[in-house]
Structures are given as structure tokens and as C-alpha cells.
Amino acid sequence: MRNIAFAKVGKSIKFLKNNYSAIGGDNEPSCVLRSLANHNPDKTFYLIGRSDFSKLNETQRLELFPYDNVVDIWAELKIPNREVLETQGELYYEYPIRYFKERNIEIDYGVIMVGQVGTVTIPGRTEQVKERSLIASVIDMTKWYSTPVITWINETTVPIVEIINDPRYKLNQARDIIRPPTISLSQYDFVYEKKHFTSFDNQDVIYTDVPVKYAGMEKAFCVDYEKPEVNTNRTNPFMIILNEGKPSRYNFLKEWVLNHIDDVEIYGQWSDDIVNNDSRFRGSIHIDEVQRKLKNVRSTFFIPIAKGWTTSKYIEMIQAGVVPFFHPTYDEQNHTGMPDYFRPQTPEELQKRVAQMANDDEAYRKSIQFLTDKYLTDDLYSGEYINDQIMSHIVKDYVRPDLSKYTKKVATNLDAFFV
């Protein structure tokens, strides 16, 4: 195996950290790709989805990928913006297929991370559900960020690894994603039903069950950071970092926190009605600013995106030196192995434990040291953990290459002086 295609469907991949949005999740594709590329210098990774990779200068690129084994296939295609899709759509949609065919490149595997995708992704080919003599429309954002990748998935025969970091976004969102994934890795064990048809000539819908395996994908967060020193000198007892989500998590937050704690800052994306009527909601801030604020916080509480789900929040909080408390529906399968103390079963239990972390310096110190030792392992920061989780599902009896046999490249220009 030599060549692996990589993409995030539905969204551009951000490699420049200052391009990360305040909503969260922008760091995950970059962290996953770096984990793979930097532990497999014998392989080439082709970006078949949109990204800001071509905006990196040589120094930035080699800092992220020192073996220079990532190729942005879009760097050679001069389509300036989305408006030209009306006249050059096919050129754009089928570009990944042509790119590999014209260069005689054989792709061995595809690693596809999933974002928000429309119910239809292929323009001009998918029948409407209620009136099959008519063709369904595709929104421009889907055309730009999803159609080329989905077109390639439908046409290729190589195995596809689906990586799910958010339970709302899977490859079942669009019925014209014809091929179910070969392997699906995520942050929870479950099975989803893939609704699709078998070809554009026969669009009768069929259903395929796709098993999804927990593979610790939430831990990719650490690749963007260095292992911290534990700092226990903190004055803010409690803070919440949480987006509202769909369905809204407001009622859960009200039951567990808002009804009990008046003096709390809540950061995240919430509806205007909530933000304008409650001064505790402070809006969204950049992930680095979140980490800066958390350095003065002792504990927090969070609610899963979907019942049972594990997110990166607990890793993010421990990284920042904050003791995390779980809502009872968070990580119900207990993949994290989090002790019961950090899993309060009632709002009253939560308040008592938040108060203990705020007022008992020794209890806080012991708690955060225990969590740091247990969860912030070196293999998370090096990317070895994420790499091994994915590659072991791709290659039987996978063994990481000996990196000492490969030479890291060094920038040859003056970019470093102007970064």
C-alpha cells in the first residue's frame, strides 16, 4: 500500500490555526492527517477535498508534514470560485477521478471524515423522492465541498474508511452516496442505517446497516498541543464551554447548571434569544482563547451532542487543567473509563463536587493530577495513537515504519523570517 486519499466531506480542511472557527471541530481533520502522514513517510496522502493547504508556505508545510508526503490535488486546478460551477461544473466535480487517471496513480484506500452534507450531492443526476421524473437540486455549498469527493467515492472501488467525529454527520446523509463505507470509526459503538440506491440507472432505494466502532477519534485534539504542566493556581471555580446544538441542549443545561449557579460564564454558540436574555452566555471564542481562559478554571460540566456520545471535550478540559464532570448520558458505554466521582447522577451531586473542587485545594490537585496521568499519554501528542487506530483497521498486523530510516525535509527559502 502506497497511496491514500484523504478528505473531509462538506467542509474545507483548515491547516492554518488562525483559520479555525469558534464553533469547534476545525482542528480534527488536520490532526488526523498529520497523525497518519507523519507516521507513514512511506505513503503519499492525496487531499481530494477542499482545504487551505495551498496557502501554506514551505516552512509552514514542512512544520506540519516534515516528510513532505501530502499532495493537494486542487493546487493545479485553476477554478477561481464557486460561481464558475454553473459553466464548469463537470470539470470540477470529476476532477479527482481525472487527476488520478491521467497520472496513472493507483489509490489503495480512502480516509473520509464527515461533515454536514446535503440530502443530495450529485447535480443533475438524482431523482426527486416524490416525483421521480424530476431531478433534485443541489445547494452550492454541497457542490463546492462535497460533490467532487462523493463523485470519487461512487466511482472508485477502493475501500473507504469513514471517520465520524459528530453523530449528526455520517455518510448516510445523502441517498446518492451509493457506496457504504468499508470501515466506520468513531467515538461510540453503534449501527446506522444507510439509505441509498445502487446506481444512477436504478434509483430504487435500499437500506444497508453500517456498524460503527469506537476508536478514540476524540483524542485527535492533542496533536495540536504539547503535554501541559499541571497548574493548580486557579481562581475561577467553574466555567461551561458548550454549543447549543440541534436538538438544543438548553433544557439540560438549565436543569443541571442554570437553575443552581448564578455566577458562571458560558461560552459557545447559542441562539440570540438565549444570549440576549441571560448575561451568563458570553458567545463563541476561538479555541486558543478558550484554552487561555480555562487556565484559570477548576471544573466544568458538559452534555453530549447525542445521548451516549463521547466528545473531545473531556480531553480538552484535562489538557487545560480543568476537572470535567459528565452528564449521565455522556459516554454511556464508558469507553473513557472515567471514575464514578466525575459522573454525578443528579444536579445536587454536581453542585457538591463543583464546590469541593472550588474550596478544597488538595482535592482539586489530586483530581487533576490523576486525570492528567491517566488520560494525557505521550502517544496522543505524537499522533501515534490516532495513527495506530486508523492504520490497524486498514493494514492487517500493521506496524509503524521505523522513522529513523527516513529524512525530514527542511525549508530552503526565507519563509520562516516572515511567518
Image (spheres, rainbow, N blue to C red):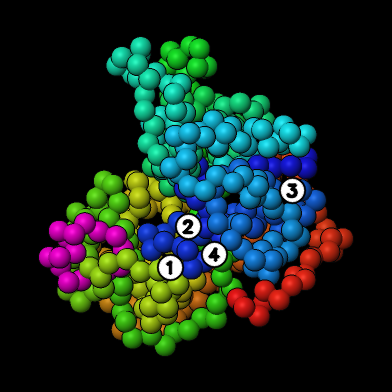
Amino acid type at mark 4: Leu
Q: Indicate which label's residue lies in the foreground, 4 or 3.
A: 4
- The numbered disc on residue 44 is 3
* Comes first in the chain, label 4 or label 3: 4
Q: Residue at 38%, 63% (x, y): give it.
A: 22
Query: How far across and down, in percent of the image, does residue 201 sit?
Result: 50, 12
Q: Residues within 10 Å of mark 4 (few under 14, many from 20)?
A: some
- The numbered disc on residue 59 is none
Query: How far across and down, in percent of the image, does residue 213 sit?
Result: 54, 40
Quarter of the C terminus within the rendering: bottom right
Q: Is residue 293 magenta?
A: no
In which image quadrant can residue 258 be found?
A: bottom left
Quarter of the N terminus within the rendering: top right
Query: How far across and down, in percent of the image, does residue 212 sit?
Result: 51, 37
Q: Which residue is mark 1?
A: 287
Residue 388 appears in the picture as rendered:
no
User: Marks 2 and 1: in contact by CB < 8 Å?
Assistant: yes
